[in-house]
Amino acid sequence: MTDRHSRRADDASRATSARHTRAAARGERSPGGIARHGRLRSHPWATFGKVVASVVAVAVVSVLGIAGVAAVNLVSDTKQSIHLDGSQKVPDIAALKGGVNILVAASDTRSGQGGAWGTLDDSSGVGNNDVTMLLHLSADHTHAIVVSFPRDLMVPVPECGDNDARELAQFNTTLSEGGMSCVVDTVESLTGITIPFAGLITFQGVVAMSNAVGGVPVCVGGDGIDDPDTSLTLSPGEHTLQGQDAAEFLRTRHGVGDGSDLARISNQQVFLSSLVRTIFSDGTLSNPVKLWGLAKATVSNVQLSDSLNSVTTLYQIALAMKDLDWNDITFVQYPTVEDPDDPNRVIPDDDEAQTLVDAIKNDQNVQLTGGTGDGSVTADGQSTPQPSASGVSPSDKAAKPGSTPAPTSTPVQLGDNVHGQTAATQTCSNGAG
């Protein structure tokens, strides 16, 4: 663990007590089930223009919810397709009213993933939730927050299916122990946030999605990346990643920062912020071939909860998100401190986590003060960008043209143990050589 996390270890007893309190007070369990087939149900569209509109919808949701967490990727079913029937009309769809919460988990399963990812005895079947992110879109549709929960986080786990509640367990075991609904229940119990939508992804999805957009440009800083565990080698400088290289970039842990899972999260945010900028660029949005390829990759590689497995719902959410300003899409790490019982595990930093959770519940935008995290640095080499009065880092580039004006309310200032970046911030991997 880094000194940043170790210096907060004296708060551990307080954090542990608060965890137990949360476990006792958890609310109702969400259905959160995942549909057996992760695909769009067949909905007819009258013209090719309507088809492209539906693809844009899926693409937007993919970036900010499913692919916006395309940190590893999904169970593929490439034989499924969207069927068109010109005799029927597209429904009159408006943007979804109110806020949106979507939980996305990326499985580390090796089952059905081919031989490129190696074998792992305890990652067969559904696997562990190696990456878990909560996307929150505000009720006024002016900002979004994407929270990454560390896989090594120790938390209480509620009763899941046939499994009894556990007083304390490693967070990444919730998928293998109780399925996606258990992951949802655990995050709801931890945060008190209701999560009606969910998606599950595996390794192959990121390959398909990165290929569909023609690659994702990333900047590698430090000494470059040389990670024998993922066979990823990247020299310092700019790279455009697609295919297995993109997936390995998201998986790399020992190639960035201090080699921790926390460093890996901030490195993933380098990719995800660039993915948002890439998909919202004119080169993608004006290219129906790329849009169709991205939609097909998403449909084929993402298992959606029953609540989300509908073209209408996806389209409504996409319309609610489509005008977001890059500066108002914020990626954050859930704040943690070192576990006093195991230096290789972390527990919630309750005070700072509560500030973050309260901002989400109250639909307030946030302002980062804690820097990007150990796995990344800003494009000018700084690890801790200084926020301006508006809550936008000086390194943030221009907002997306034609986007919705930023909210006028004062953003909530997060503590120095909450790391992350906006989608507009240009960052580089903090390569460990």
Image: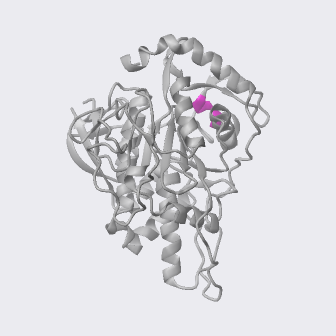
Instruction: Assign the N terminus to one quadrant of the image.
Output: top left
| Magenta span dominant secondary structure | helix
| Residue situated furthest right in the rendering | 162
- The image quarter containing residue 331 is top left
Q: Please say whether residue 250 is visible from this viewpoint.
A: yes
Rendering coords of residue 260 (x, y %): 41, 26
Give me the residue at 33% from left, 37% from top.
Answer: 231
For the rendered model, the colour scheme is one colour
11 vs 308, nearest the viewer: 11
Q: Please say whether residue 203 is visible from this viewpoint.
A: no
119 vs 127, nearest the viewer: 127
225 vs 288, nearest the viewer: 288
Rendering coords of residue 46 (x, y %): 58, 85
Residues in magenta? 171-175
- The image quarter containing residue 420 is top left
Rendering coords of residue 266 (x, y %): 39, 36
75 vs 266, nearest the viewer: 266
Q: Is residue 317 above or below residue 14?
A: below
Q: Is residue 284 above or below residue 223?
A: below
Q: Is residue 356 above or below residue 168?
A: below
Q: Would you say 106 lies left or right of 275 here? A: right
- The image quarter containing residue 78 is bottom right
